[in-house]
Amino acid sequence: MSDSIARDCVRTGVHAGTWQDAIRLAAAPLVERGSIESSYVERMIESVNELGPYIVLMPGFALAHAAPGEDVHVSDLSVALLDEGVSFGSDNDPVRVVMCLACVDRESHIARLQTVAEKLLDDTFVERMVACGSDQELYELVNA
C-alpha cells in the first residue's frame, strides 16, 4: 500500500455501533474527497447483505468494496481504526480495522487488492494497526 492511502483518508478512534456504520464511517473520507459518491457506500453495504461477511478477510480486519461503477470517480483507499470491535457475523469478528477500496475499473481493482493482500501476509499487520494511537501513526504504518 506504499503511498496508496492519503493522510486525510486515515482515521483512528472511530466509533461505530454496527457494521453498516463502520463501513459508512470508513468510507466517509472517500466521499469527502469526491473519490466516490454515497451510492457506492450503500453498494458496499448491500454486497455484504447479499453475500454475507465475505469482506472480513482475517481476524479483526474487513476490506469493504464493491464492483467498479459510475459512482467511483477516482481509485482510492481509506482506513478506519474502530475504538471498539463490531460484529459482521463472521468467524473473524470482532472487526477493529475497516479498509475501503474504490476502483474505477476491474484492472485497478485487482491491482489494489493484490497490494492490500501483500501487507496482510504479515501476520502481525492487523495487530500493529490496532496498536496505533494516532492517525499519523496509522498513516505511517500503512504507507511503510
Image (cartoon, rainbow, N blue to C red):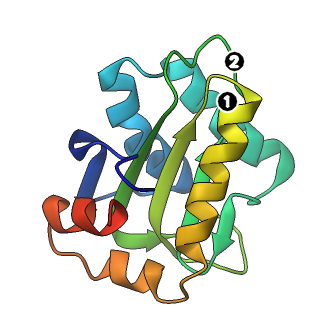
Q: Are marks 2 and 1 in contact (CB under 8 Å)?
A: yes
Q: Name the foreground residue: 108 vs 70.
A: 108
Q: Quadrant of residue 24?
A: top left
Whether residue 87 appears in this view of the structure is: no
Crowd tier of the residue under label 2, counting other residues whose Cα lies within 10 Å: few below 14, some 14–19, many 20 or above: some
Residue 49 in the image: above or below residue 30: below
Residue 19: % across, % down? 54, 55
Residue 121: % across, % down? 61, 79
Residue 44: % across, % down? 65, 37
- Residue kind at label 2, given as amino acid type: Gly
Crowd tier of the residue under label 1, counting other residues whose Cα lies within 10 Å: few below 14, some 14–19, many 20 or above: some
Q: Quadrant of residue 25?
A: top left
Residue 115: % across, % down? 58, 57
Task: Give the residue at mark 1.
Answer: 43
Task: Give the residue at mark 2.
Answer: 69
90 lies left or right of 4 = right
Residue under the point 74% across and 60% down: 53
